[in-house]
Image (spheres, grey):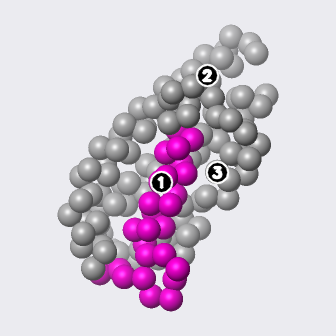
């Protein structure tokens, strides 16, 4: 790899780690909203509630970010790329419906959703550097 690519990859890694910390901070600040959302948006015909869907995405995306933080790489890169491409946060119907339908409410959770999806995109970018 060229020095410019390595520098870019290190920058993306640094941004992933920084975003992971930011995501944790945002999550801590959403406690009140999460409580209200659990009451206002119970699961209807879905297998998982809105918050459960968010948790599932969070566990997977954070897991990859933590691998990068601790080891500087992600194992099973091709599988990770496939999973991250399929995990488009706003493709989950409950999340998209909530995000676009809550009219100025729940801004902390919306910030969390945006940050989570941005972290997913940074992870994909990091993996592209590794596969080049």
Horizontal side of 125 relative to 132 (left or right) equals: left
Magenta segment, which residues?
40-65
Q: Is residue 65 above or below residue 109?
A: above
Residue 15 seen by the camera? no
For mark 2, give the secondary structure: helix
Q: Position of residue 27 (x, y in %)?
A: 32, 52
* Number of numbered labels in the structure image: 3
Q: Position of residue 21 (x, y in %)?
A: 37, 37
Does the stretch in magenta take in 47? yes
Residue closest to the eye, 42 or 92 = 42
Assign the C terminus to one quadrant of the image.
top right
Assign the N terminus to one quadrant of the image.
top right
Q: Residue at x 72, y 38 (%)?
A: 77
- Few, some or many residues within 10 Å of mark 3 (<14, 14–19, 20+): many
Of discs 2 and 1, which sits in the foreground? 1
**Contact? badges 2 and 1 (CB < 8 Å):** no
Q: Residue at x 55, y 70 (%)?
A: 92
> Mark 3 and mark 1: span between their CA atoms?
11 Å
For mark 1, give the secondary structure: helix
Q: Main secondary structure of the magenta part?
A: helix
- Residue hosting label 2: 8
Q: Is residue 29 above or below residue 45?
A: above
Q: What mark, if any, has residue 84 been given in the picture?
A: 3
- Residue hosting label 1: 58
For mark 3, give the secondary structure: helix
Q: Position of residue 14 (x, y in %)?
A: 49, 26
Residue 73 seen by the camera? yes
Ranked by sequence position, the earlier of labels 3 and 2 is: 2
């Amino acid at each position: 790899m060229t020095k410019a690519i390595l520098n870019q990859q290190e920058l993306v890694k640094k941004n992933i780690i920084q975003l992971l910390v930011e995501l944790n901070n945002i999550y801590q600040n959403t406690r009140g909203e999460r409580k209200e959302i659990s009451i206002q948006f119970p699961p209807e015909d879905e297998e998982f509630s809105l918050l459960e869907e968010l948790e599932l995405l969070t566990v997977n995306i954070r897991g990859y970010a933590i691998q990068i933080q601790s080891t500087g790489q992600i194992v099973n890169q091709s599988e990770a790329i496939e999973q991250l491409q399929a995990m488009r946060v706003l493709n989950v119907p409950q999340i998209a419906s909530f995000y676009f339908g809550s009219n100025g409410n729940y801004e902390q959770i919306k910030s969390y959703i945006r940050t989570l999806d941005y972290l997913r995109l940074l992870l994909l970018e990091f993996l592209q550097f590794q596969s080049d």
